[in-house]
Amino acid sequence: MKIALLNERITIEKSMVEVDKIGNHKNVWSKYYSCYATISSESPQEETSSGAVWDESKIDFTIRYSKEVSVLSSVGYRVIFHNSIYEIEGIDHMNYKKKSMKLHCRRVER
């Protein structure tokens, strides 16, 4: 893996349940891990229905393997890149060599 290609900073957030003073449960996102990534397979796509436009862009992030990212899953984690939120659709462990991981993501609205 060429380290020079890891040129964009991403933040991985984790979903957690927070309980307020009166016992209400609320889902909140908190910063879990920040690292550099290689961006690939960008596929911008817009969908129009009933006069509304949705941005369904897909993107892949390749990151270095570490103990923090070894527990990632497509449920409960998301990626923040250039102030846009990306939902993790799948994770490629790159032949389980424990050198890198590829996150297949889709852009979501705030």
Image: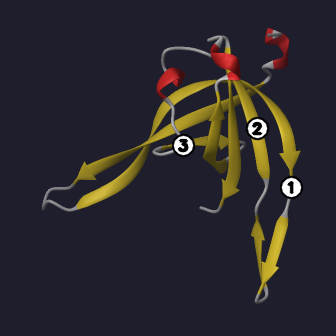
Secondary structure, mark 1, is loop
Question: Mark 1 or mark 2, which has the lower sequence index?
Answer: 1
Say which amino acid is labelled 1. Pro
Which quadrant of the figure has residue 108? bottom right
Which residue is tagged 3? 74
**Label 3 packing within 10 angstroms: few (<14), some (14-19), many (20+):** some
Q: Position of residue 93 (x, y in %)?
A: 64, 24
Are there few (<14), some (14-19), or many (20+) residues within 10 Å of tag 1?
few
Q: Residue at x 48, y 45 (%)?
A: 75
Task: Name the residue beneath numbered marker 2.
Answer: 60
Q: Residue at x 20, y 62 (%)?
A: 24
Q: Nearer the viewer, residue 79 or 72?
A: 72
Q: Is 64 rendered above or below residue 28? A: above
Q: Secondary structure at mark 2?
A: strand
Indicate which disc, 1 or 3, sits on the residue closer to the N terminus.
Answer: 1
Q: Is residue 45 above or below residue 105?
A: below
Give how far apart the Cα atoms at labels 1 and 2 are: 12 Å
Up the image or down, 52 lies above or below 17; here it is below
**Is residue 26 placed above or below 65 in the rendered structure?**
below
Q: Label 3: state its secondary structure.
A: loop
94 to the left or right of 110: right
Query: Of the residues shown, which amino acid type is indicated by label 2?
Result: Asp
